[in-house]
Image (cartoon, helix red, strand yellow):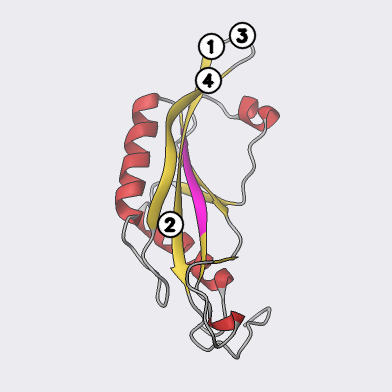
Amino acid sequence: MAGLDLVQVQEDIYDHVVLSFPGYKVYQDFILNDQQLEKIDARVKPFIIISWDSLRRSARNASFAGVRFDEYYSGFSIGVIAPTPTQCRRAMNYITDALIGWSPDGVGKLVPTGGIGSFVVSERSGIPHLYMSMSSFVFPMNAIDPGSNISPGS
């Protein structure tokens, strides 16, 4: 990995989730709104969503050599949508267990930073429709070759 290639790190994490959970569809950058949730039938197979964070500079580990040598970090939120609370809770526990401490090449280990238990998505009438659970992870990363930059398509 040259430069601060967050795109490659995100792809590695995505691939790890897909390979670890072959029975689940995994969506990236999937934004749920009320209309989409209402269209999802309660008989849906549980699925996983990942929302990526941007690259941020760590204020604690700055380098005298320059900003490209500083430590950076990023993260993501990962969630499960399922038709029952038990499926949702179990899937989120399995996912969290598979991600804690795992690390793509050249990046620090994934560390959980928070999450929420399963919560219900109700229809307008108040009837439970789906269940969701979310968790967040962060990871530190440094440039392996600080003088180089990533380029699209590389």
Q: Which residue is mark 4?
A: 129
- Measured in 3D between alpha carbons, the distance from the residue under mark 4 to the one under mark 2, in whole angstroms, is 26 Å
How busy is the neighbourhood of tag 3: few (under 14 within 10 Å), some, or many (20 plus)?
Answer: few
Ranked by sequence position, the earlier of labels 2 and 1 is 2
- The residue lying at 31 percent from left, 60 percent from top is 101
- Measured in 3D between alpha carbons, the distance from the residue under mark 1 to the one under mark 4, in whole angstroms, is 6 Å
- Measured in 3D between alpha carbons, the distance from the residue under mark 2 to the one under mark 3, in whole angstroms, is 35 Å
Tag 1–tag 3 contact (CB < 8 Å)? yes
Q: Which residues are magenta?
A: 75-81
Q: Which residue is mark 2?
A: 18
For label 2, the SS is: helix
Q: Residue 103, relative to residue 86: is it above or below?
A: below
Q: Residue 89, relative to residue 6: is it above or below?
A: above
- The residue lying at 67 percent from left, 82 percent from top is 151
- The residue lying at 59 percent from left, 85 percent from top is 66
In this rendered view, identify the residue nearer to me: 70 or 95. 70
Q: Amino acid at mark 3?
A: Ser
Rendered location of residue 148, percent (x, y): 61, 89
Tag 2–tag 3 contact (CB < 8 Å)? no
Rendered location of residue 32, percent (x, y): 63, 37
Tag 1–tag 4 contact (CB < 8 Å)? yes
**Left or right of 29 on screen, residue 135:** left
Q: Is residue 64 magenta?
A: no
How busy is the neighbourhood of tag 2: few (under 14 within 10 Å), some, or many (20 plus)?
Answer: some
Q: Which residue is mark 1?
A: 127
Q: Which residue is mark 3?
A: 125
How busy is the neighbourhood of tag 1: few (under 14 within 10 Å), some, or many (20 plus)?
Answer: few
Q: Residue 74, relative to residue 135: is it above or below?
A: below
Q: Amino acid at mark 2?
A: Val
Rendered location of residue 99, percent (x, y): 35, 55
**Left or right of 39 on screen, residue 9:** left
Which quadrant of the figure has residue 2? Answer: bottom right
